[in-house]
Each structure stands twice: as structure tokens, then as C-alpha cells.
Amino acid sequence: MPKHTPLYDAHIAAGARMVDFGGWEMPINYGSQIEEHHKVRKAAGMFDVSHMTVVDIHGARSRHFLSYLLANDVAKLQTPGRAFYTCMLNEKGGVIDDLITYFMDETYFRMVVNAATHDKDMAWISSQAQAFDVVVKERAELAMIAVQGPRAREAVLSLLPESDALVAAELKPFNAGQFGDLFIARTGYTGEDGFEIALPAESATVLWDQLLGVGVAPCGLGARDTLRLEAGMNLYGQDMDESVTPLESGLAWTLAFKDEREFIGKEALLEQIENGVKNQLVGLVLKDRGVLRPGQRVITQAGEGVTTSGSFSPTLQKAIAFARIPKNASQSCQVDIRGKLLECTIVRPPFARNGTVCEGVI
Amino acid sequence: MSNIPSHLQYTESHEWVSAEDNGNARIGITDHAQEALGDLVFVELPAVGDEISQGDPCAVVESVKAASDIYAPVSGLVVAINEDLESDPALINADPYGDGWLFELELIDSEELDGLKDAEAYEESLDD
């Protein structure tokens, strides 16, 4: 039996086309994926992300635990509500999952991990937690709605009590706060401004309907994928997994290993740097007509590689992709699309954010 | 529910065939197919003058989601292609049986048309 989020009936009522995603029956689109994509770049759209896993960490040694568990350094999180993006690595430096971690207070941190990796994440986090005497509490009773786009914040703020709205309006990017039942974070996965809101499952449809009422468009996983690809954001399981490290996944910026802190995977990362990182994750823009897809062969002057994500970019009106290719490759390459070798430009993601194409991409 | 005009013929792989007055066959994809694929963003058509055989993959339509081969419902010589699709593949979504047609064939063996499904049989195949 596929799992349903608390918003399942709302999706059906809105005419969603449902697909299986990691065991969850989720909306892929509500008609046109491209229209939903543009809606988020130009106005406001919302995504049901209730399938994602909220994990709370409680206990006096929470900070110590996460300092060891995560490849980014929780020492960076000092103000309550502050959050960052990080990878959780295995001993070999392979990526178990990527996640957002929020600092609530010294005895309480929150993590939001992927749906498709739920079981292995929970097993890993729980086993590592034992040595630190912290409580790992999965918050399956929470639903989550991501409201994204240049008009997303004003739409959400218009629905809050005035006193909460005043405070929530001041949340900086990668900061969160609790407002009554609503945990509101200024984060997202689209390259647009907006909020991600965790709330009790029983309140989810009320908020969803209120957001519909102020003109926020329901958007499916299809648009979420093209938006995150344009925004240069990796998708776990596609752009990275346990067989690669953040260093070959465009995620070196999320690593903090220049000090004495010990964390899982650190030794392996240092060894990889010592031996030379062989591959890099880059962006590709197809010069010809056609569509890039995951798993296509990439030919560069420095050797072969492979596309990890790829689609048609509604903002660029061109095909774009991420590709893992040899470290020394640059400028241009060819991609094998059904036996034809088509020319691509190698670029540094993101491709598009904040409503427009990024500089230097086309 | 998806639109299945009764005057057309169909294949199990969701192409439609229209027997034109001049004896040619015009070919496209069904409403069901365009809806399943989602927003079309790229179409690769055969060239005018190509000779194609029934069952051959002869064109590709790509949506944001996936690429899908188009199989020749009948054999023939390509006499026209829908050039508007190059700049506007979404015509297939908007009007799959009209402005979203793909290409036109001069038939080699008009009896091949008899082997295609009528609207009723195609609709039944969707229910399976």
C-alpha cells in the first residue's frame, strides 16, 4: 500500500496526477508542470513535502552528537532558529543523505531528511546517537508545506496573526521560528525566496486551503525537480549517494574540516584530497535542440563522464543537466543522446534563481 | 477522461492515424499519450522523403518528464512533417488531433490500415 500524506485528498480535489515517490503517492503535477514551474519563479507556488522526515534531537549532548554526525559544523549554528544544509557521511565519506539542520536550543536540534532514505537514515542516526545519550525523535505526525516564489512570504504572512506575522517577516534566509502550531523556516529547494512550514497533520489541509485562497498555486514533484535543477541543488540518489563523496558532488562548500573537529567520514575526505579528487559535478547546457536526461554518456577532452540529472529548463528554454566528469574537463563537452553526440557548454550551477537566468550560463 | 475521436484509427502504442482525402495517412499521438507524457518540450521528426516501415521507431517526442519513441503505425514515404512543432512542441498538448499532428505518409500498402484499432478498441486497450 502506498503511503498518503495528510494532503492526499486535497491533491485529488485539485486534479493532481499522482505517482509513487519512495513509497509515497505524491502529486507529479496538477495539469502543466511548466506552468507550475513559472508560477514559482514569478509569483508563488506550494509543494506538499509531508513525505519528508522531521527528526528532533533532544539532550544535553545534542550539539556534540551532531558535531560528529554531520559533515558541516554545527558550531556555525549559534542563534536559536539558525539552520544549514549539510551531508551525513559514512566512514568512507560516501553520502548517506543530505539534510537541513536547525538549532532550536542547546538541548534541541531539528533535522529534515529525505523521504526515500527514511529507513537507513533513522537506523544510522539512532545507532550513532547511542554513544551520546541523546533522544532521537521522529516527528511523523508533522505535515510539511513548502511555499516558494517571490510572493510566497507575503502570502504566508497574510495568513498569520499580526504579532506572528511581524516576527516571521523578519526571519532571515536559513532561519526558523515556532509560531503557535507552525514551525516556519525561510528555506526551500527552488532557488526562490519562501518558507517551509512544518505543522500538525490535522492542520495541514486548513493551511493548504488558505494558501489556495490567497492565490498560491499547488505545484507537483515535476516542477520541484526542474526548479531545484535550475537552482543548482542536488537530488539525493541521483546526483550523489553512498558511492561518492561531497568533494565529487559539488558539495565541498558544505564541508567544514579545516579544524580539529572529528566527524564521520573526515579521514576518508582528507585521504581523497591527498590523493587528488578525480571527478567533479558540473552543470551542462545543451547548445543544440534536444533534452538532457540522467544517465547519458558525456565525452570531454579529459575523459568520459555521465549526466546525473537532466531536463528541459523552462526558464532557460534549453536542456540542462548536472554531470559527473573528470576534474580537468572544462568549457565544452559532448553528450550522447540516443546515439547522437550533441554539444554542451560546461557551466557552474546554478542555472537560474530569483526569477531569472544566472549570469554566464547562456 | 481522454478524448478518442471516432473517425480516427489507433495503435496500442498510442499513435493515431487519419486517412486523408488524398489517400495519405496523417499521424499523431493520442490525447491519452500527451496527458501521460505531460508538457512536451522537444520533437524529433523523420525527414520528408524518408521511407519508414510499420512498427519502426521513426520519431521521438520528449516531455519534461521523459522521452518517448513514436512507432510508424503503417509503412510509407514521409511527404510532410509538422514544422510548427519545432518552435512549439506544446501544440501536441493543446491539440493532439489537430495542430499537434506529427507527419504525413504516402501509403505503401493501404491494407495496413485495416489492422489498426478503431476508437472503441483503443479505448478498451486503455482500460486494461
Image (spheres, coloured by chain):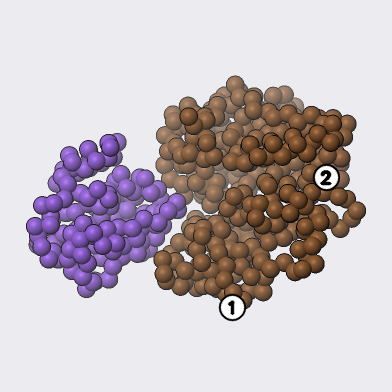
Chain colours: A brown, B purple
Subunit under mark 1: A
Q: Tell me the residue at 50%/46% (across/down).
A: A222
Q: Amino acid at mark 2?
A: Tyr
Question: Is residue B104 positioned above or below B116 on the image?
Answer: below
Question: Is residue B102 positioned above or below A114 on the image?
Answer: below
| Screen quadrant of the C terminus of chain A | bottom right
Between A358 and A247, the one nearer to me in the picture: A247
The residue under label 1 is A301
Q: Position of residue A356 (x, y in %)?
A: 59, 57
Q: Provide the secondary structure element on which disc 1 rests.
A: loop
Q: Position of residue A47 (x, y in %)?
A: 56, 38
Cα separation between marks 1 and 2? 40 Å
Q: Position of residue A294 (x, y in %)?
A: 51, 58
Q: Amino acid at mark 1?
A: Gln
Snapshot quadrant of residue A108:
top right
Asked if labels 2 and 1 touch by Cβ distance under 8 angstroms, the answer is no
Subunit under mark 2: A
Q: Tell me the residue at 64%/28% (across/down).
A: A140
Q: Nearer the viewer, mark 1 or mark 2?
A: 2
Asked whether residue A339 appears in the rendered view, the answer is yes
Q: Residues within 10 Å of mark 1 (few under 14, many from 20)?
A: few
Q: Is residue B36 left or right of residue A188?
A: left
Q: Earlier in the sequence, mark 1 or mark 2?
A: 2
Q: Is residue A127 left or right of residue A117?
A: right
Q: Tell me the residue at 27%/49% (across/down).
A: B14
Outermost residue toward the bottom in this view: A301
Asked whether residue A171 appears in the rendered view, the answer is no
The residue under label 2 is A68
Q: Position of residue B109 (x, y in %)?
A: 10, 63
Q: Provide the secondary structure element on which disc 2 rests.
A: helix
